[in-house]
Image (tube, grey):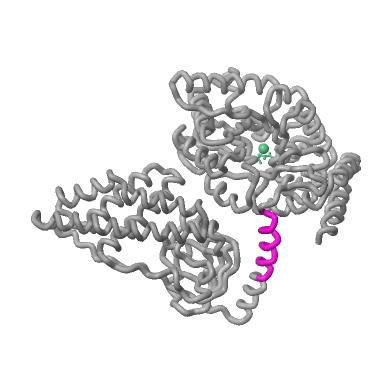
Amino acid sequence: MHGFRGVGASPGIAIGRVFVHVPPSLAVSDATVPAALRQAEVESFLQGRQKALVGFESLIDKVRAEKGDDLAGVFEGHAEILMDEELGEAIVGRIRDDGQSALAAVRDAMEAQRAEFLALDDEYLRQRADDLSDIGRRLMLAIAGVEEVRLEDLPKGSIVVAQDLGPSDTARLDRDRVAGFVVAAGGRTSHVAIMARTLELPAVVGCADIFDVATSGQVIALDGGDGRVMVDPDAEALADFECRRAAHATAMEAMRALSPLPATTGDGHRAFLGVNIGTPADAEAALPWNPDGVGLYRTEFLFMNRTGLPSEEEQYRAYAAVVRAMKGRPVVIRTLDVGGDKPVDGLGFTREDNPFLGWRGARLFLYGSDGAIPNRDPEVKQQMEAQLSAVLRAAVDGNVWLMYPMISSVEEVDVLRQQQDDVRARLAAAGRQVGQIRTGIMIETPGAALVADKLAEKVDFFSIGSNDLTQYTLAADRGNGRIAPVYQPFHPGVWRLIAGVIKAARRRAIPVGLCGELAGIEEAALPLLGLGLDEYSMAAPTLPRIKRIIRAATMPEAEAIARAILDAPTAAAALAMAGDAMRAVLGRVQ
Ligand code: PEP
Ligand code: MG
C-alpha cells in the first residue's frame, strides 16, 4: 500500500484500476531540410493539418452530443487556432526559409506562440497556452501519422494516471469508463483541474511521485476533495474509501437535484443566492452550483503576494473573464479592500496602531496622508483610476455592479461617486467603450448601518459585510482568538443593525444582500429571509445547503423567527431559537 497527497482538484471519491496514460512519443529531427525537399515538407504539414482538422471535427460532434454546446465550443476554438492563417504562414515560413522539418516547424511555432501567452502572466491566457500545446501535439501526431492512444475505450472503472492531460484528452474520456484521474503535473487552477470539475470526475493533480509506484492494473483509490491517493490499498483503507464514496454520492445526489432549482420558499418568495469569489478560476468552479450571480468578487487577491501592483489591463482581463463566465448574471466587483489584516506591497502603507480602525477599504481612495480628500497620492490615484477603468470596461461584456467597502458616511459616498464619474468621463473622452453599471456600498460599520436610510438615497444597492459589522459592533477583532467568545455573529445587537439596514433598503426599493460568512451559516438563513434580505452570497459549495432551507420554509415562518431573534436576550439564545426553527422546517421535507 502506498499513500500520496496531491492537490484535490475535483471533489468526489473514486476507486478503480490504474490506467497509465503515456502519450505516443515523437522523434523530431532538427537537421536542416535540403531546399529541394522543402515543398514536400510543406505538403506534409498541410495534409497533416487537414487530418487534424477532421479529428477535431469528429471530437466536436462527439463532445456536442455527450457534453453540450459549451464544451464543444472550446474545441471549435481549437479548430480555429489550428487553421489560423497567421500561424500557418509562420509554420510554412519556418519550413521554406529556415529549412525546418514540418514537425520541428510546428513544435517551434507553437512554442513561440505559447511563450507569448505565458509572458502575459494572466490566468485566462495561461490556460489558452495549455490549449496551444494540445493543438500542437495533435497536429504533430497527424503529420507523423502516429495514432493517438484511444482514451475512448478504456476498461470500465479505469483511473487514468498521467504526467499531464490536455483538454482534448480529458474531453475524450468516457465518463462511463473512467472513474477519475491522477495527474503528476498541475495545480488547482490548471486546465486539467478545471476540466475535471466541468466533467464532474474526481481528480487529484500535482501528485508528482505517483509514477514511482503506479502501474496499469493496480487498484487505486482517490479523494478529489482532500487530494489523498492510495495505490494498492489494504482492506481497511479500501473500506474507508468505500464508506466515504457512499456518503459523498448521497450528499451529491441531494445537492445536484437542487442546483437547477431557484431558492424559492414554499409560498413563492424568491431569494437570490450568489457566490463569493477571489479569482476567475473561482467563478468557473462555482458554475456547477448554478449561482444567481457573484455576490462578492474580492479583487484584492490580484494585489496580494506579489511585488508591484496589477496594471489596468491585467485587472480588466480578470474582471472580464468573471463577467463573461457569469453570462449576464450580476457580478458584484468590490474595489480594493486592503489594509487592516491585509496589507499589500506599494500604495504607501505605514504602521498603524489600530489597523482595523485605520486606513483600509475605500478609505485608501478617500484620505491622503496630507489630509487631502480625496487622496491625491499619485500611486493610489493611479490605482483607483486603473481599477475603476477596468471595471467600467469589463461591464461591456455583462452585468456589473461596483461596490465600495468600509463606508462610514454619506460624504464618503459623494466623493467616491464623483471620482467614478470623472473616470467614466475620461474614458468616454478617450473613445474607450464602457458599460453601464450599478454602484453600491458595503454596510460594515455600525455608523453606516445607523444612517442606512440616508445612504440608500445615494446608491443602487447595499451588501452587508457581516464579518466586519460584527467586529465593529462588538468591538472584537475578528482574528483575535482570545476574545472569540465576544465575536458573536448571532448577537442580537448585530441583528438589530442588519434589520435596520434591510428596512432602509426596502423603503427606498434598492436591493440588499449579505456577503459575510453569516450568509452561509445554516441557522441564519431563515431569520435573514424573514427580515427581507434579497440576496445571500457565500462560498459556492455552501449554496445548496442554504437553498434547501429556504425552499423548505414559508415567509410567515421566516418572519416569526426573525422577530424572535431581534428580541432574544443573548447570542446563544438567538442561535438556539434559529437552530430550532431551521430543524423544524427541514424536518418537514426529510
Ligand atoms: C465582510 O466584512 O463581511 C466582508 C464580506 O468583507 P471581508 O470579509 O472581505 O472583510
Ligand atoms: Mg469586510
In percent of width and height, residue 211 lies at 43, 71
Which of the two residues, 542 or 566, is positioned nearer the viewer here? 542
190 lies above or below 390? below
500 lies above or below 55? above
Would you say the magenta stretch is mainly helix, strand or loop? helix
In percent of width and height, residue 205 lies at 49, 62
Q: Is residue 568 left or right of residue 226?
A: right
User: Is 251 part of what is drawn in magenta?
Assistant: yes
In percent of width and height, residue 465 lies at 70, 37
Residue 338 visible from this viewpoint: no
Which of the two residues, 175 or 521, is positioned nearer the viewer here? 175
Please name the residue shown 83% across and 53% down the image.
582
User: Is 518 part of what is drawn in magenta?
Assistant: no
Quadrant in which the C terminus appears = bottom right
Residue 482 visible from this viewpoint: yes
Q: Is residue 141 left or right of residue 461?
A: left
Snapshot quadrant of residue 58: bottom left
Please name the residue shown 88% across and 44% down the image.
556
Q: How many marks?
A: 0
Which of the two residues, 509 or 32, is positioned nearer the viewer here? 509
- Residue sitting at the far bottom: 235
- For ligand 1, give the image quadrant: top right
In percent of width and height, residue 252 lies at 66, 62
Q: Which residues are magenta?
A: 246-259
Please name the residue shown 62% across and 20% down the image.
415
Please name the residue shown 73% across and 45% down the image.
519
